Image (tube, rainbow, N blue to C red):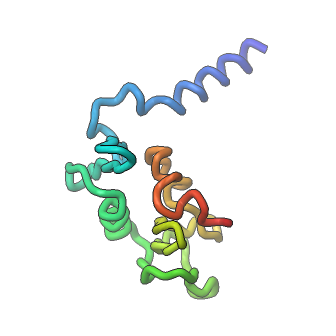
Amino acid sequence: MKLFLMMLILIAGNAYADLDLAPGERDGQVQVLDGDQFVAWDSIQEQWLLPEDFWRSFAERKRGRIWPSSTDFPPYAEVNEHDTFLYQHESGPCLMYFFHKRWRRANDVWRWSPAFNAYGGCANVFD
């Protein structure tokens, strides 16, 4: 029982680790500007970027293919591990990342800020 409680505390602590970070300490860390708009920290460029610019920068430095942005997913037979794709959902864009044989939201793989899951079409990408 003690082991279970300790594991639960560790997991919960890691989930909120970003709350203790100073701005600009972790790739994909988010700062909220006026209203709902936010910017994300790009640790390679060492600057705050708008979400879509952050995604573009991320995709350009990864090893997979960058598929053209579209409302339709690329043909499954042509996709490879680590490919990226900016899906254009009716409620906005969402960066997708091909990982373990299926498309996932890039944030689900890379665990940037949870704010990315509510940005653009990311909340509805699998509807």
> Between residues 117 and 55, which one lies in front from this camera angle?
117
Q: Nearer the viewer, residue 24 or 7?
A: 24
Q: Position of residue 117 (x, y in %)?
A: 52, 52
Q: Name the residue at 29% across, 30% down.
A: 22
Q: Residue furthest top?
A: 2
Q: Is residue 34 above or below residue 91?
A: above
Vertical position of residue 24 compared to residue 82: above or below: above
Tell me where residue 67 sits by quadrant: bottom left
Task: Point out residue 87 in the picture as x, y percentages from the top left corner.
Answer: 50, 73
Q: Please state the horizontal and vertical placement of residue 118, each as a whole percent of the image.
A: 51, 52
Name the side, left or right, on which 77 lies relative to 47: right
Q: Residue at x 27, y 40 (%)?
A: 24
The image quadrant that residue 108 belongs to is bottom right
Q: Residue furthest right?
A: 1
Q: Which x, y percent locates residue 116?
A: 46, 52
- Residue 63 is left or right of residue 96, and the answer is left
Q: In this image, 127 relative to 41: left or right?
A: right
